[in-house]
Image (tube, grey):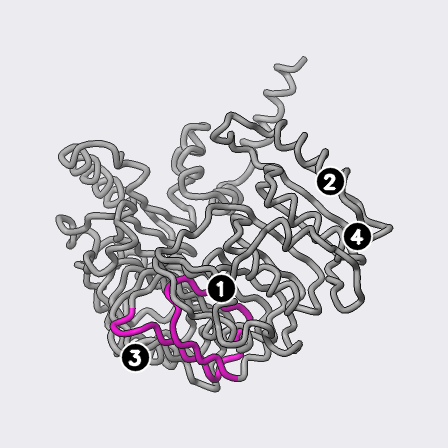
Amino acid sequence: MKKKQKIQHSNYFSKLTDSLLFIIVSLLPFKQAARTSVLSKQWSHIWHSTKNIEFNENFFVNSQESEEKKGNQRRVFIEFAKKWILNFQESSIQNFILTCSDPGKYLTDIHDIIIFALDHNSKNLTLDFSDPQWDDCDIEEHPAIFDLPFKFYKHQFLESLKLASCKLGVSVFKFGSLKDLSLSWIELRGYDIQTLVNNCPLLESLSLIKCTGMYELEVSNPNSRLKKLVVDRCSFVFDTSISIDGPQLQIFKYSGKVGEFHIEGQKCIQEAELEFGLEEEFERLGDLLSDLLEQLDSAKVLTVDSYLLQVITHGDDPQYCGEGDLEIRHLILKTALHANEFPGIKYLLESFTLLEKLTIEIGPLKVLRRYEPRYRFNPEGCWTKNLILYKDMEIDVKEVEVKGFRGTKNELFVLQYLLVLASSMEQMNIYLSREVGEDGSNVETYRQRTVEGVMKFRRSSKTLRISVN
C-alpha cells in the first residue's frame, strides 16, 4: 500500500509543467537546486533555469589542502562556472554570487563570468575575492588585485550590491536603483563615502567591513534615504572619525576603535550597537563613550560590549549619562560579568530610567593592558549588601533574559541585585551554558547552582515568573 502511495505522489510531481518547476527551483539555494538534477530525467536540465546563481569556490576548494591541490580544485571550479553559463538559456537572473579567494590566475575568466551576470540584468550581485583565512588585524596587508569591468559601472538594474576585495572606481560609481551596499576589504580614499552616498540617491543600507584608507567617514547629505549604517573594523588613516548629519538613520552599528563621533540630529534611531574589540590598552575615555551614548539618545535598543562596561565610568563625571533623556527600552550587555565591568553595568542601569528589557549575553572578558579600576570595588558588597528598596533606586525593567549562565558567584550577585531592585519585573528567563567548564562542570551543574541560588534570594516583584532553560 505504501509503495503504491509513493508511486502516486511521484506521478503527481511529474505532471508539473517545466514552467512551474522553473519557479520552484528558483526558490532554492543554488547548491540545493543543483541536487534536484538527480531526481529524474525531467529535472536534469531544470536547475539550469534557476534565477539564483551562486558560484562559490568553497564548494570545490578544501582550505586544508596544500596550495597545489587548492590550485587544481580552483581550476575545476572556474571550468564548472564557465561550462554552466554556456548552458544557461534564460534572459534574466535575480541573484548572482561569485566567490573566489585567489582570482589572480583567472582574471579573464572571472571578467567574463561577471559580464554574464550583468548581461542577464542581475538585481542582486555579490562579488567576493577575499580570503577567509586573512587575519582581521592585518587589513592593510591584503590589497585588492581585481579591477571591476567597465561595464559594471553602466549596470543600472542593481538593487543590492556586495563587493569584497575589489578595486573600486568611486568617481564613476553611480547606481540610481541601488538600495543596499556592502563593501569589505576595499580601500576607500579620502572622503569616498560621501561620494558613494551622494551618487546612490535610493541607498537605504550601507555596510563597511574591514575597509581601509579613510580620513573620515562623513555622511552629511540631508536628502539621503540612508536608514542603516554598519561600520565594522575599518582602518582610518588618522584617528577614527565618524560624522553623520543629514540622513535619518534607524540602525547604527559600530565595531572598531574609540574615536570622535559626531552624530547630529538623529531622532529616528531605533537600534544602536557598539563594540570596541580593537582596543587593546586601557585609556580613560569614559567621557567620549558617555558623549556617544548621549548622541544616540533616541535609540530604543542598545547593545554594548565588555570594553565599554569597563571604561565608561572612567570620565570626569561618571554619575550621569544623558541626564534622564535617553530613550533606551532594551539594553543588551555582552559581558563576562567580571568585577571590572560591574561599575559600568550599574552606571547604565541607573542611567536608563525607561528600561523595559535587559538581556545579558555572558561571554569572554575583554582584557585591557594596564587596566586601573576607578576605585576599589568589592563585587559582593556592591551587589548584595544593604539591598533596601527605595523608590529612587528602583529599576523599572519588566523582563530580564540571561544567556550562557553558569551559576558563578558573580552571576548570582547580579541576579540577586535585579530581583531586589526590579520590583516591576514580570519575567526572568535564564538560559544555561552548554559548554563544559574547566573544572568539568556541565549544564546539570549550572542548573543546580542556579536553582539553589535563586531560591535563596528575596524578590520584590509579586508577579515574577522565573524559568531556567
Which type of secondary structure does the marked residue at label 1 adopt? loop
Residue 92 visible in the picture: no
Q: Which mark is residue 374?
A: 1
Residue type, mark 4 in image: Glu
- Distance CA(mark 1)–CA(mark 3): 38 Å
The mark that comes first in sequence, 1 or 4, is 1
Q: What crowding class fits label 3: few (fewer than 14 Cα within 10 Å), some (14-19), or many (20 or more)?
A: some
Q: Position of residue 334 (x, y in %)?
A: 53, 53
Nearer the camera: disc 2 or disc 1: 1
Which type of secondary structure does the marked residue at label 4 adopt? loop
The mark that comes first in sequence, 4 or 2, is 4
- Distance CA(mark 2)–CA(mark 1): 30 Å
Q: Is residue 290 left or right of residue 234?
A: right
Reading the image, the residue beneath label 2 is 454
Reading the image, the residue beneath label 3 is 191
Please provide the residue range marked out in magenta: 236-264
Residue 33 vertical position relative to residue 248 in the rendered view, above or below? above
Residue type, mark 1 in image: Arg
Pick the residue in front: 137 or 110: 137
